[in-house]
Image (cartoon, rainbow, N blue to C red):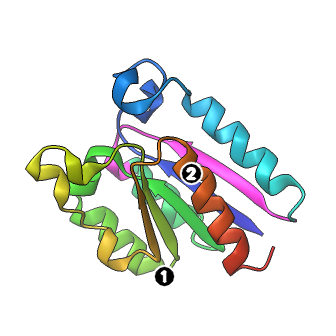
Amino acid sequence: MKILLLNGPNLNLLGQREPETYGKATLVDVENTLKVFFQNKDAEIVCFQSNHEGQLIDFLHKHKDAAYAIINPGGLTHTSVSLRDAFSGVGLPFIEVHISNVHAREEFRHHSYLSGISSGVIVGCGTHGYLMAADLIAQRLEL
């Protein structure tokens, strides 16, 4: 069973960019945590990060046979109708994750184009939110 982990723009800078907001864990740390989590659950986590919207969409189209996805769309959360359409188009259930509490930040960060079609949203739990999403997926898929 394949689970996708997608990360959008600037998430390659985790651990370096604004550690007071995003913490000190790197994206590799997050990916390794999820690989360990899923290794004994008969599931494979396929990780992808891009600073380019089209590459995220192409990756999603290529892996539309996955069972579930976790996505932190970064700034695309608030701008990308195309990413929303891609998820709708492939029919893949997903959980949206945000490291910071987007509702306690600038007004423009309060709206997500993805939340309305997601099967869950986790905000403000730091990088632990990814593991929370993985645990929820494992429960839903009875892994």
Image quarter of residue 42? bottom right
Q: Which residue is mark 1?
A: 91
**Residue drawn at (80%, 45%) of the image:** 36
Tag 1: amino acid:
Gly
The part of the chain drawn in magenta is 42-54
Checking the image for residue 104, the label placed there is: none
Q: Say whether disc 2 or disc 1 marks the residue closer to the N-terminus.
A: 1
Image quarter of residue 29? top right
Q: Looking at the picture, tell me which residue is in the foreground, 19 or 38.
A: 19
Q: Looking at the picture, tell me which residue is in the foreground, 74 or 54.
A: 74
CA distance separating discs 2 and 1: 21 Å
Residue 93 falls left or right of residue 108: right
Q: Quadrant of the N terminus?
A: bottom right
Residue 128 falls left or right of residue 108: right
**Residue 41 image position (x, y, % from top left):** 86, 64
**SS of the residue under disc 2:** helix
Counting labels gives 2
**Residue drawn at (57%, 45%) of the image:** 128
**Residue sitting farthest toward the top:** 16
Q: Which residue is mark 2?
A: 130
Tag 2: amino acid:
Tyr
Is 91 within the magenta? no
| Label 2 packing within 10 angstroms: few (<14), some (14-19), many (20+) | many
Q: Looking at the picture, tell me which residue is in the foreground, 57 or 6.
A: 6
**Residue 116 image position (x, y, % from top left):** 30, 77
Q: Does the rendering let one see residue 41?
A: yes
| Label 1 packing within 10 angstroms: few (<14), some (14-19), many (20+) | few
**Residue 109 image position (x, y, % from top left):** 18, 51
**Residue drawn at (81%, 73%) of the image:** 143
**SS of the residue under disc 1:** loop
Q: Which is in the foreground here, disc 2 or disc 1?
A: 2
Using the image, determine if residue 30 lies above or below residue 80: above
